[in-house]
């Protein structure tokens, strides 16, 4: 007997062949799906676990850039380290419109989640609260903060 171009002994053999092909195709599809999902979970997890860098730009209130520098120099950097925050560097802009009131710095943390925890711990630190209060005794020294979170490119020497 020939059905759909297949030479078979009887109709039950035909159905066995069809079922085997369906099972084989389904198994291959299922394995492909599992591998694809596993890879997706791996890559999304590794992206969440990727080291992030936080670029912060602080604007001092008029006349307070030196006070802001002093707070970082004398206290903030030490308190950052105490909480495991990695300071990559501090910069002063050279542009005329920013050099009188702007401080820029870069922090490196292990993950986005760790970044949140480190900042929570830093803000809750009683020493930081005392330093912030003391440095603002004669008026607020910080006028604004801009923060951006980045990851290094695959060709970055920072990876």
Image (cartoon, rainbow, N blue to C red):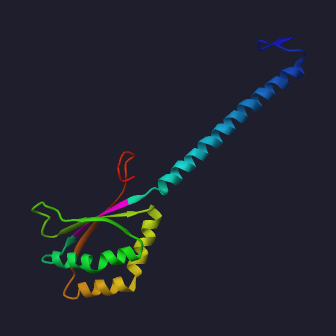
Number of numbered discs visible in the structure rendering: 0
In the displayed orientation, state which residue is furthest to the front: 157
- Residue at figure coordinates x 89%, y 15% from the top left: 9
* Residue 30 coordinates in the image, percent (x, y): 68, 38
Chief secondary structure of the magenta span? strand
The one nearer the camera, 133 or 106, is: 106
Is residue 142 found left or right of 79 in the rendered image?
Answer: left
* Residue 148 coordinates in the image, percent (x, y): 32, 60
**Residue 28 drawn above or below residue 133:** above
Residue 9 included in the magenta stretch of the image: no
* Residue 48 coordinates in the image, percent (x, y): 48, 56
* Residue 40 coordinates in the image, percent (x, y): 55, 46
Is residue 45 found left or right of 139 in the rendered image?
Answer: right
In terms of image quadrants, where is residue 59? bottom left
Q: Which span of residues is magenta-colored?
A: 53-58
- Residue at figure coordinates x 25%, y 76% from the top left: 73
The one nearer the camera, 102 or 158, is: 158
In the displayed orientation, state which residue is furthest to the left: 96
- Residue at figure coordinates x 42%, y 66% from the top left: 115
**Residue 133 drawn above or below residue 41:** below
In terms of image quadrants, where is residue 137? bottom left
In terms of image quadrants, where is residue 141? bottom left
- Residue at figure coordinates x 62%, y 41% from the top left: 35
Is residue 36 found left or right of 101 in the rendered image?
Answer: right
Quadrant containing the N terminus in the rendered view: top right
């Amino acid at each position: 007997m020939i059905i759909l171009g297949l030479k078979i002994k009887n109709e039950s053999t035909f159905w066995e062949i069809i079922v085997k092909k369906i099972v084989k195709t389904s198994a291959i599809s299922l394995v492909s799906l599992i591998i694809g999902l596993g890879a997706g979970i791996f890559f999304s997890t590794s992206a969440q676990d990727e080291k992030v860098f936080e670029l912060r730009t602080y604007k001092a209130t008029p006349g307070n850039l030196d006070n802001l520098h002093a707070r970082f120099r004398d206290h903030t950097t030490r308190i950052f380290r105490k909480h495991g925050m990695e300071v990559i560097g501090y910069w002063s802009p050279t542009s005329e419109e920013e050099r009188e009131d702007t401080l820029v710095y870069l922090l490196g943390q292990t993950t986005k989640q760790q970044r949140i925890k480190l900042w929570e711990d830093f803000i809750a630190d009683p020493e930081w609260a005392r330093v912030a209060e003391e440095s603002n005794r004669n008026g607020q020294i910080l006028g604004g903060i801009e923060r951006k979170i980045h990851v290094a490119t695959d060709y970055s020497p920072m990876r």
